Image (cartoon, rainbow, N blue to C red):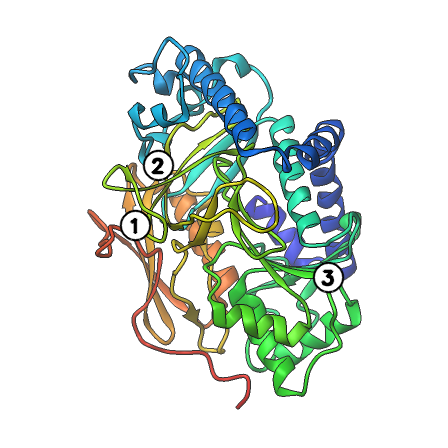
Amino acid sequence: MTALATRIYFTSPIWLQNLMITAYGVRLRRLRYGRVQRDSLASLRLSQWLPGEELQAIQLGELNRVVSLARKTVPLYHGWRLPDASLGSLDEIRHLPLLTKEQLQQPAAVVTSNRFKGERLQQVHTGGTTGTPLTIYCDRSTLQRNYAFFGRFLEWAGVRAGAKVATFAGRTVVPPKQDAPPFWRRNAASNTLLFSSYHISPSTVAVYLDRLEAFAPDLIDSYPSSIEPIARHALSRGGSSLRPAAVIASSETLSPSVRELIERAFHTRVFDHYGAAEMAALVTQCEAGSYHANPEFGIVEVLRDGQPVAPGETGDLVATGFINPVMPLIRYVTGDTAVQGAEPCRCGRAFPTLLGIEGRRDDVLITPEGRRIGRLDPVFKAVSSIHETRIVQDAHDHVRVEMVLHANLAPEEEAALRRELSYRLGPSMKMDLVRVGRLPRTARGKLRAVVNEVGITAPSILD
């Protein structure tokens, strides 16, 4: 939302906020669902049971289509040595160059196919787990294909169409200064209750659980760091009446202990998945518990020093996407890491397996009020001049936003950044914006986008 729209929303009565969210939900439904989504989902229900060799043949055909499209129509790839002839096997993908996030930080005319020149494109913004903000361009058909895959994932999890959903994510649906419930808003268009991830603290967790139980969702879709304290509180008071069909975890690394905690608290199974705004890779957990790279979505490679790792080893996750012809990504270095799988899954699908995604271990910030703040990449959507950024909590009431800029930070961008941060961190947290020449990496070359240096942990819900 624009600054004006945000102010109007935050100062409106709650009934009007619910109406505004529902209106936005109607727009999203129109974009995400329709004939393309229905036809794609019907096809995916069949293709998931194809033998491995048939799936690989489909992948090879899609790979050659994407390479041809990129070579002929996308200026970004004009300097690449992409083959004129079709690749003969999937192994030949290793001869193609790697694509970095920095290469994607160029104008739309450079990174998109000229076949879509003049068309109205959708923009998807991401700060990413590596702290490098990107704008991804696509069309409505791409969005619908993407949601067809998510629809198949929900079917794996046993969630029916039209299910009642409780969502904990990165949108600031509740004004940051609000200190009393309700900490949620309603999207009637999708039968969803949107809970604020930014107001969860030891003093509010009970009302969150009470509202969840009253709502009785069929599905909880949440960041692990948001639902974990609510699950802990449920167990501390002897259990919960919640019986959702599933909990869908996303956007953060899900540890085995947190998975077990959530499943025990809510008497259900947790289904984890990995996806990104770039729409180059999709990894979803099946009913047998395996992580599957969806082969119709794209090709996932796990590499170390440019070479495939052995089963059980960790490497960089590199993805080639099939579903977005507007902005095709070939061998895109996601910045995340994964553990290569080996054995076929007992679910019966001949999909490639991973043992896990290890690239999402950002620290959690703790506000003076005791709120746990995990994912913060949405705050950088309105700031186009940032190359990379890192948020460091260096005192109990202070964060330092370190920025590597590829252009001067305009006053309006600085104001937008401060505003978005304050919406999420609350009024007690002070901040400084600091321009730096480079950001430090871990031993694995990863950038931790959120760092807690003060060692503060959230007060126990059990205290």
Against 389, is 213 above or below? Answer: below
Q: Amino acid at mark 1?
A: Met
Q: Is residue 187 left or right of residue 450?
A: right
Query: Can residue 208 be seen by looking at this rendering?
Result: no
State the image coordinates of residue 316 (x, y, percent, origin top left): 33, 45
- Residue 210 occupies which quadrant of the picture? bottom right
Q: Is residue 209 left or right of residue 226?
A: right
**For discs 1 and 2, the disc positioned in front in the rendered view:** 2
Image point 58% across, 68% down: which residue?
A: 227
Q: Earlier in the sequence, mark 3 or mark 2?
A: 2
Image point 59% across, 42% down: which residue?
A: 349
Against 230, is 296 above or below? Answer: above
Label 1 crowd bin: few (<14), some (14–19), many (20+), radius 10 Å: many
Per the image, the residue denoted by label 1 is 403
Q: Nearer the viewer, residue 336 or 423?
A: 336
State the image coordinates of residue 95 (x, y, percent, origin top left): 29, 24
Disc 3 is placed on an element classified as loop
CA–CA distance between discs 3 and 1? 42 Å
CA–CA distance between discs 1 and 2? 16 Å
Disc 2 is placed on an element classified as helix
State the image coordinates of residue 421 (x, y, percent, origin top left): 46, 58
**For discs 3 and 2, the disc positioned in front in the rendered view:** 3
Q: Amino acid at mark 2?
A: Lys
